[in-house]
Image: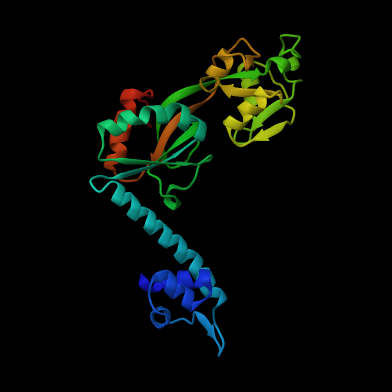
Amino acid sequence: MTALRALESFERTGNVTQTGVELGVSQSAVSRQLKVLEDYLETPLFTRDRKAITLTAAARDYCTQVRAALEQIGTASLRLKANPRGGQLNIAMLPAFGVRWLAPKLPDFVARHPEVTVNLSTRLKPFDFAAEPFHGAIHFGQRDWSDVAYHELMREYVVPVASPRIAERLRVNALSDLFSLPLLHLDTRPDAWERWAQTLGEDVECPVGMLFDQFASMIQAAIHDMGAALLPTYLVENELEDGRLVALWSESKTSIGTYYFVWPKDEPSYQPRDLFLHWLEQVGGTGSKE
């Protein structure tokens, strides 16, 4: 580990002396560690001449992977120090759902299970659990994430909204009139408008419009007269109440997907996740598992 840290530092600094300063050891100690690593790997890592020592191209690629591994070890160590009594529960969440639905409920879980540390990170799309350090994730849509188990949390209901100024353009109570407005889109739900129309029995071709990667920015765009947005009702309750946004359609119980908590189907039981699932059954979600 000492030799790997020396190599990682040398790759960044390009200088044995500076590496020694960074690690708090002498220049000769750094040189010895680099030589120890080279001998251990039985592979030349450096190009040496009278004036300088430089890494080979292969060694630079190796350093990239070593750096990632060292960072992962460092993160694991910090998490262990933060919660030496219990386990870690790493959850990948969707940002809007995490902020509005999950985060307000989490203090209750923490109070019930102080031995578990919950770590939240953002992921917008399904990923390979084998390649990511997560024990579970929040998924929206259908049951289309392969090799995972599902726990249903809630149906999402959507409503088209716009600023009062944009809403004034909607003269006729027809979908064709609504779709003539500038439409805002979420890049992870490119067909949301069409699917919403289909639930109402209409087949409408959706025009291309502005694209957003998160609901928060799309809500602000709608408030500032950029167009109509199809948004989850739970996200815009305050904006509708104070008049910054107005509903463009009377039907507000149209759902185009469901939120799930998912985890690797064939992974052995993991106590922090089991505790979390039991808690979800008590405070939220339908309890439906598959």
Residue 253 located left or right of residue 211: left
- Which residue lies most toward the left here? 85
Q: What is the count of numbered marks?
A: 0
> Is residue 260 visible to the viewer in this orientation of the structure?
yes
Q: Position of residue 162 (x, y in %)?
A: 67, 19
- Quadrant where the C terminus sits is top left
* Residue plotted at (59% across, 23% down): 231
> Is residue 142 visible to the viewer in this orientation of the structure?
no
Residue 230 located left or right of residue 284: right
- Quadrant where the N terminus sits is bottom left
Q: Position of residue 59 (x, y in %)?
A: 51, 74
Find residue 70 and report its image quarter: bottom left
Q: Position of residue 128 (x, y in %)?
A: 47, 48
- Which residue lies most toward the bottom here? 50
What colouring method underlies this structural image? rainbow
* Residue plotted at (34% across, 28% down): 280
* Residue plotted at (44% across, 27% down): 101
Compared with 62, 232 (above or below) is: above
Compared with 186, 21 (above or below) is: below
Q: Position of residue 195 (x, y in %)?
A: 62, 24
* Residue plotted at (23% across, 46% down): 85
